[in-house]
Amino acid sequence: MKCKVLSLLLTGFLLVFISFGLCGCWDRIEIEDMLIIVGMAIDCSDDGNSLVITYQHVIPEGVGGGERTTPARKSPYANTSLEGTSFTETSEILHSIKSRRPNYEHLMVIILSDDVARNYDLYQLLNGILRHSEVPRNATILVSEGKARYFLDVEPNIEDIPSSNIMKISRDTKRKSGMPFVVKLGDLSEKMAAGKSIAVQRIATRDSIQLAIDATATGTGYVKEDVYEVRGAAVIRGNPCILAGWLDEKETDGINWIMEKGDSGVVQGRHEDTGEIVVFRIRSAKTKIKPYMSGGDVSFIIECEMEGSITEDWSIGVSSFDEEYIEKVEMVVKKEVEKTMHRAINKIQKELNTDVVDFGKKVQIKYPSAWEKIKGDWESIFRDADIDLKVEINIREFERKGMTK
Amino acid sequence: MTLERDVGQKLNTPDIWLSVLIAGAIFIFFGTISARLSRMFPGETIFQYSKTITGKFFGLLLSMAIIIFYTFISGYEVRILSELVHTYLLLRTPKEVVIIIFICVGTYLVVGGINLIARTFQLYLPVILIILLSILFMGMIEFELENLMPVLGKGILPVIESAKATSLSFIGFGVIAVITAFMKNPGKAVNAVVAGIAIPIVVYVISAIIIVGVLTIDEVKTLTWPLASFVNAIEYPGGFVENFQVFFLIVWILAIYTTFVGTHYIASIGLSQVFNKDFGIFVYALNPLIYIIALFPGNIMETFSMGSRLGYIGLAIEGLVPVVLLIIARIRKKGWYKRKEGGTG
């Protein structure tokens, strides 16, 4: 009898206790209560003393397929710019002015303005973002020329949301020339943790002459999203992590080829004798960087082997079926590639003095014990290193037309 | 979970996987010793035969040390679980609630006894292995061999030295000293322990290679949960696979659960054999203690340092104690040796 009462009491107690667990957990957030942040732009304030962080969030009613003709359709996104001294400070303000709680799980792009990248150590600046448990490590990083928040304001034509437009441009690096491989938040963090330099994609407004041509061509004024481009690269120095300078499209191509990130892009050269244009499309590229060390001097030989096709040739009266002609074109392309690479190397080595390609790693792999001694002043050693090129071009095909006249 | 960071901070070179391999070999050795020792006393656990070997007093002392150690490990496992859940899943749920619920679920299985535990583990092992390995290989997309080089850049010595930092990850093989008593075929205890340690070695080595190859050693050192951050970065074009943490956390909670149940079981059965009382009571009696231990570290740093200390203590309790016991047993001719006049060992 006594036992029965006890077990009944115990059961009753358990039932009450368990029912506490059933009423829901602390962390339940309805999707209607989330403010989904998809993009961020970080600027300096006008007086330069604080940051202006722009958050782009989705307005769910405005997104989605279906009837796009409805005129009363809400805009699918909105931007909020907030001033503060740190990421967390501004995100707290955001929380207090919005009816919904910010959620960073779908953050796609982070744009840093050149001002910010020059004046702040990015490792410090991005610390709050890197610590945040919701921020994905694969958010794309770009550095903008001019105000970063401007690019989140440009309404795209094809995509719904500016952030996803920018992300799609920057992610698609295959077979494009003039832009470095996409840098994600995680990649940047890895480089910064190691104190290494990195080339980040550059986003900038296109020049006004080009825009004017667009405008006359369409007749109705230019398409809004066409006002910016993702081309060239911003070089972030390793320690401290600040913007060192820019690379133009050619220099970016050169770096890409050296880093073997460029099974992409085209090389445009001119025939020496006739001055006609000939364009080579890269199908595959293999690059080997060989470090050599003698005494305290470091030198490198870059061996680059490219395969591809002739994709455009303005010369008249030539035949691509002719072995000799192909060899001639190979020479033209080879010279152009060498020129581009030399230019790129010269820029990063002498002008910016940042080891974007990570030549240091090659030395570390081949001469691990010597590397321990020289890694402290690697940047200055790198500046004086001899870098030689060995380029080999193989034309494998010439597409659908091989002969003119 | 934090293996890569623990070793990475000590080692500073990408050779983490080598450290793990070396440590693994050492632990296989210790595990084999432990299994051989248990085989000499069929049907007895370490709590019983330690008395036979070293006498009543030292046996009791040793048993208590082992019980306390496994209670601490249980508490630590629960705490680590609550920390990770707190960071990635339930940001605002109090850790105490996670801890209590987890202890309850664990107790449910432990009370069921060794057969139930063994069956459950059998069920979990393939699930854990398949999901974990597939997550690791999916992350290979950004793998760069260069991040793992140079191999042995600073020589072999630092690699061996930091091998000890992995000990926490291997803790738990000591169960062999208890479960051999319940095995149908104790003769296979040695094989079982070798397989039981070899599987984690393979998984750890693969994960160390992939994580360092993807994240680089410099980054691994800075991350609180390297493996979780690695999973966070996995992404396939078109958003086909994203936010993989959920799968990963499921697997990881299962893994922690099995460890917790194992250690909790050892502590409980130890107490019941030392005091000769019913096993069930001690399972419940240990729970408040585990709860207090779990809440003992004030913050995450203290949790981690508690973990590495437990790792070293574990090395002594699971590794050295059986070695010492085996030597004493041989000298005093206990167990098999007594009956077989020397025996084969």
Image (cartoon, coloured by chain):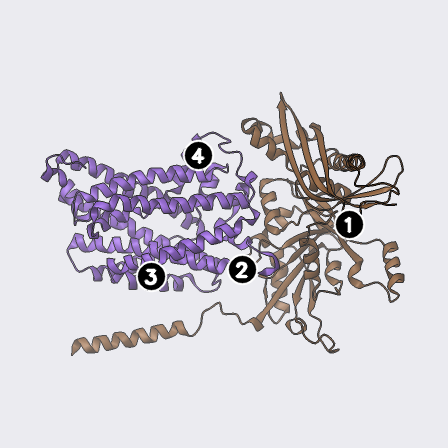
Chain colours: A brown, B purple
The quarter of the displayed image where residue A70 is located: bottom right
| Furthest-top residue in this view | A295
Q: Chain of mark 1?
A: A
Q: Are marks 3 and 2 on the same chain?
A: yes
Q: Are marks 1 and 3 on the same chain?
A: no
Decide which of tag 3 and tag 2 comes sooner along the chain.
Answer: 3
Disc 4 from disc 3: Cα separation: 37 Å
Residue under pointer 4? B159
Residue under pointer 3? B103
Q: Are marks 1 and 4 in contact (CB under 8 Å)?
A: no
Disc 3 from disc 2: Cα separation: 28 Å
User: Is residue B165 depicted above or below A140 in this figure?
Assistant: above
Which amino acid does the dot numbered 4 rest on? Val
Query: Can residue B284 be seen?
Result: no
Residue under pointer 2? B243
Disc number lying in front (1 or 3): 1
Decide which of tag 2 and tag 4 comes sooner along the chain.
Answer: 4
Give neighbour class at mark 4: few <14, some 14-19, many 20+ (Cα, 10 Å): many
For this rendering, which residue is in front, B52 or A66? Answer: A66
Q: Are marks 1 and 4 on the same chain?
A: no
For this rendering, which residue is in front, A20 or A255? Answer: A255
Which amino acid does the dot numbered 3 rest on? Ile
Q: Chain of mark 3?
A: B
Disc 2 from disc 4: Cα separation: 34 Å
Decide which of tag 4 and tag 3 comes sooner along the chain.
Answer: 3
Q: Residue at x 75, y 41 (%)?
A: A251
